[in-house]
Image: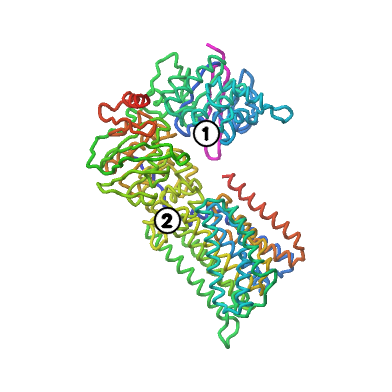
């Protein structure tokens, strides 16, 4: 057994009114990958912020032993000089600066304040090679994909001589391929550079793949630490620890009771708004039946969100052509309000930037697209509004003090429920859900699947876009496979397996 | 599925506990008033001075009412001072140089204000030029045009009928004393307020929404009615209610209503909170922004008319720096520079804070130089206090 690099003892962190961490203990062995799992709000990120000095010494109780020495970090800089680097879920890169400038941000290769660009470039190239990033160091960061941006973050960490790398949900925004690459890189860095890693993730299959030990945190307390080399680990085993009970079924049962064709798109073509000649969606046709849940699977960048947004009142893209039918009749959807009037709703992938008004109340967020129905002569009937919101608030079991609470203060799962409440109240016939469970914990996911089921049950047509294959397969009656702007396959029933979907994608790549 | 049992709380009750910062500024206003009341030897609240205070600040307050929706959408308007000047120049040229009837000039000026607002709104909403740049350009364009129209001269005086809005008081019934019309108006206003509040409460009870206790409710109504009646009575001790105060009151009530109770109002707040999300909820965000600027143009025209009528002349430097006073009033009153937060009443309180500071310091004999510096300091402290309050949550 290798020696312990980091030990956090009896960590207690309190915020006004809540105890976020309640006597957390964790030991991380040198040159190991240690995973932290737990539901949203369990305290994983808080713990890492305590470790890295975001919450300075004195604002928490307990002690941190690093390399055998007690540490009292007052800020991130102090922890970084010890080689502890944290990469947050929301990447801290400056979009308009180049890769090399980002790598050395705050750690510039300079002599007396004057930057040595040759050295900077040379060093950047070396680090980029280590992480396997094949780009020019001058390329602006916003021109490369999220997967590569993640690599830039890791290169940045390496430039600081990292010994303990903390990754907060590193693969949340990545597709399966990029995720696999990233995890391989972490394993390689451990081997070649003797780096220790702490990884926070919701994706349990990844955790079981890379971690040497897994610590489960629930409600701010350490529940257990599982040694992956000592026993066989199943995802069910971890989930049990996370939620405190066994979830026998991760997806609610559903029966396919699809009726007649409700919604149909034919020959849909969308071009990129930046480069008019580039095809984003390439002659896509599909249909959805009444009471059916249809999944759209595919890798990140396959064009699924762009497809959905362009159908939803041309909210994305240029040079759009194709025809949309509802109940057999062709409809025109030139704007979002056209789409809503025709009974189409779209729940955006990115809740924070495109979905919610975070500085506004749950109430204002739920009724935003439906104010017309709640008003007479342009004057909103607030009493009716409160009544309606209360109804959906209770129906979807949104956890908040009341409907006047700001949506910015809610957890991811509850924010998603507000989004669903908004569009369910708008009473659409066709509901497009884009990554409805991204960044949401297991328990809340199950509740959202139940809501989707109920919607289908009531005769609505639901289209679910998801990057998680098990999820698409678990909740849909039928799955379209999308790759590089085209629909490359359709699977349902017995054929609906991850292997078949990946097969469709791989075949189309040739 | 489990359900959570909770009480349904009325909006007002909630608003009271949430908006401490709004009341904070109101309390600050009262403190400032009391301070000057002492330091000016009780001159500040003399009926004549109250009257003067209202008239002196009316045009800034009108601009503030127009500015708030623009700020709520996350934008700004730097051109309003120049629009005030150009409106004065047009009305002066029409009435004084060309001897056109007053009503025609007023109509032309209001339409011109709308047109200017539409012009700027077009660039901001549809061409997506940042509002700061469009209105900075507008500030130069309309100041320049004012000088072109006036040829560098100052026009005046206006006929009495033009000055009516800005300088007159509510006319009295012939043969009576004590400004009965003013008091009648106040009684009507107080009665109307009480009636509406009662109706609202009844509606809320009907919808099963929990309302505040009867005593608190009665107390609130009584306090509001007494304030209305007392202020009016105080004004009768001078020359009655200024016409401009009636206009201001109507505008404040109307715009408070529009921003809080109507669909367009809710769209403005949503747009300021998150433009993309609002767009994806089917709101025609471009038109909402456009409307905010058309409205700003109209308000600037009204302010231009009031200002030229009050000064009784139209000059090339009229309205210099008004935009900054109006913007400062909104921020002091709790509006957020990034949009989505702020109220009409808050902005008016902010405007009054500035107005009372101006007036009080003038009475004390403090020079315009120090007045500027102190006003700047107040703006900074007020906004810093706001931000501190928010981060504390």
Q: Chain of mark 2?
A: B
Can you identify the residue that label 2 sits on? B210
Query: Please, is residue B168 above or below residue B72 in the view?
Result: below
The reply to whether label 1 and label 2 mark residues of one chain is: no
* Residue lying at 44% horizontally and 41% vertically, measured from the top left: A415
Report the span colored magenta.
A1-29
> Residue A128: where, in percent of width, then height?
56, 23
> Residue A494: where, in percent of width, then height?
25, 26
Q: Is residue A12 magenta?
A: yes
Residue lying farthest bottom?
Answer: B175
* Residue lying at 35% horizontally and 27% vertically, measured from the top left: A508
Q: Nearer the viewer, residue A34 or B234?
A: A34
Is residue A7 visible in the rendered structure shown here? yes
Q: Chain of mark 1?
A: A
Q: Is residue A53 magenta?
A: no
Characterize the magenta stretch by its predominant secondary structure: strand
Q: Quadrant of residue B357?
A: bottom right
Answer few, some or many: residues within 10 Å of disc 1's Cα (few below 14, many 20 plus, some between 14 and 19). few
User: Element type at marker 2?
Assistant: loop
Q: Is residue A344 left or right of residue A190?
A: left
Is residue B25 visible in the rendered structure shown here? no
* Residue lying at 56% horizontally and 45% vertically, measured from the top left: B393
User: Element type at marker 1?
Assistant: helix
Tell me whether circle 1 and circle 2 mark residues in contact (CB < 8 Å): no
Q: Nearer the viewer, residue B148 or B212?
A: B148
Q: Is residue A277 left or right of residue A73?
A: left
> Residue B265: where, in percent of width, then height?
47, 58
How far apart marks 1 and 2 lie (CA) works out to 54 Å
Q: Which mark is residue A143?
A: 1
């Amino acid at each position: 057994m290798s020696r312990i690099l980091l030990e956090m003892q009896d960590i207690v962190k309190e915020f006004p009114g809540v105890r976020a961490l309640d006597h957390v203990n964790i030991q991380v062995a040198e040159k190991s990958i240690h995973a932290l799992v737990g539901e949203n709000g369990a305290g994983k990120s808080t713990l890492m912020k305590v470790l890295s000095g975001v919450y300075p010494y004195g604002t928490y109780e307990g002690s941190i032993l690093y390399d055998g020495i007690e540490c009292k970090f007052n800020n991130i800089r102090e922890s970084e000089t010890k080689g502890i680097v944290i990469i947050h879920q929301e990447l801290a890169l400056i979009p308009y600066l180049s890769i090399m400038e980002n790598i050395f941000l705050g750690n510039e290769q300079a002599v007396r304040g004057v930057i040595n660009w040759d050295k900077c470039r040379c060093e950047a190239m070396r680090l980029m090679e280590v992480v396997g990033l094949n780009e020019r160091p001058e390329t602006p960061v916003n021109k490369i994909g999220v997967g590569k941006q993640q690599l830039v973050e890791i290169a940045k960490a390496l430039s600081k001589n990292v010994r303990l790398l903390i990754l907060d949900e590193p693969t949340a925004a990545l597709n399966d391929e990029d995720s696999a690459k990233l995890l391989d890189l972490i394993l390689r860095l451990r081997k070649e550079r003797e780096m220790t890693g702490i990884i926070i993730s919701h994706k349990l299959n990844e955790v079981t793949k890379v971690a040497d030990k897994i610590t489960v945190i629930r409600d701010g307390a350490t529940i257990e630490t599982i040694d992956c080399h000592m026993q066989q680990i199943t995802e069910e085993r971890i989930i049990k620890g996370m939620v405190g009970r066994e979830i026998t079924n991760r997806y609610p049962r559903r029966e396919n009771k699809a009726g007649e064709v409700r919604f149909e798109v034919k020959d849909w073509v969308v071009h990129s708004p930046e480069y008019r000649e580039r095809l984003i969606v390439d002659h896509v046709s599909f249909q959805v039946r009444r009471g059916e849940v249809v999944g759209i699977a595919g890798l990140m960048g396959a064009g699924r969100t762009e497809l959905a947004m362009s159908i939803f009142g041309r909210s994305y893209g240029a040079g759009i052509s194709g025809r949309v039918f509802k109940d057999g009749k062709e409809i025109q959807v030139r704007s979002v309000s056209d789409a809503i009037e025709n009974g189409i709703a779209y729940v955006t992938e990115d809740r924070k930037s495109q979905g919610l008004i975070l500085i506004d109340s749950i109430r204002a967020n739920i009724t935003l697209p439906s104010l017309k129905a709640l008003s007479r002569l342009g004057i909103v009937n607030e009493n009716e509004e409160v009544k309606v919101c209360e109804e959906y608030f209770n129906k979807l079991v949104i956890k908040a003090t009341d409907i006047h609470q700001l949506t910015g203060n809610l957890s991811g799962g509850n924010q998603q429920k507000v989004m669903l409440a908004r569009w369910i109240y708008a009473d659409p016939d066709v509901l497009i859900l884009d990554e409805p469970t991204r960044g949401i914990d297991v328990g809340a996911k199950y509740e959202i699947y139940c809501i989707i089921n109920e919607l289908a049950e009531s005769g609505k047509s639901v289209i679910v876009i998801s990057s998680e294959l098990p999820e698409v397969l678990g909740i849909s009656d039928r799955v379209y496979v999308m790759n590089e702007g085209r629909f490359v396959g359709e699977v349902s029933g017995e054929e609906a397996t991850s292997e078949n979907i990946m097969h469709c994608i791989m075949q189309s790549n040739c | 599925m489990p359900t959570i049992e909770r009480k349904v709380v009325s909006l007002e009750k909630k608003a009271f506990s949430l908006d401490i910062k709004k009341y904070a500024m109101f309390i600050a206003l009262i403190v400032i008033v009391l301070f000057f009341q002492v330091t000016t030897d009780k001159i500040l609240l003399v009926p004549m001075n109250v009257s003067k205070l209202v008239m002196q600040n009316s045009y800034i307050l009108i601009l503030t009412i127009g500015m708030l929706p623009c700020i709520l959408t996350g934008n700004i308007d730097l051109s309003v001072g120049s629009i005030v000047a150009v409106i004065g120049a047009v009305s002066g040229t029409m009435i004084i140089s060309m001897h056109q009837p007053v009503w025609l000039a007023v109509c032309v000026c209001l339409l011109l204000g709308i047109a200017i607002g539409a012009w700027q709104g077009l660039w901001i909403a549809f061409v997506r030029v940042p509002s700061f740049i469009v209105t900075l350009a507008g500030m130069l364009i309309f100041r320049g045009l004012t000088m072109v129209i006036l040829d560098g001269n100052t026009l005046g005086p206006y006929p009495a009928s033009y000055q009516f809005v800005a300088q007159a008081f509510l006319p009295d019934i012939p043969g009576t004393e004590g400004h009965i019309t003013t008091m009648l108006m106040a009684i009507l206003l107080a009665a109307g307020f009480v009636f509406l509040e009662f109706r609202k409460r009844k509606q809320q009870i009907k919808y099963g929404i929990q309302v505040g206790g009867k005593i608190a409710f009665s107390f609130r109504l009584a306090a509001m009615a007494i304030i209305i009646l007392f202020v009016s009575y105080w004004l009768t001790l001078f020359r009655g209610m200024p016409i401009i105060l009636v206009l201001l009151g109507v505008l404040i009530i109307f715009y408070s209503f529009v921003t809080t109770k109507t669909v367009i109002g809710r769209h403005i707040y949503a747009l300021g909170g998150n433009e993309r999300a609002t767009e994806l909820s089917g709101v025609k965000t471009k038109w909402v922004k456009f409307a905010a600027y058309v409205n700003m143009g109209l308000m600037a025209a009204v302010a231009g008319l009031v200002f030229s009528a009050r000064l009784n002349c139209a000059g090339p430097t009229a309205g210099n720096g008004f935009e900054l006073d109006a913007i400062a009033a909104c921020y002091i009153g709790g509006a957020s520079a990034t949009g989505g937060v702020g109220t009409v009443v808050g902005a008016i309180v902010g405007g009054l804070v500035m107005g009372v500071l101006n007036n009080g310091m003038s009475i004390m004999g403090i020079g315009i130089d120090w007045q500027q510096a102190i006003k700047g300091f107040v703006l900074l402290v007020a906004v810093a206090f706001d931000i501190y309050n928010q981060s504390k949550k």
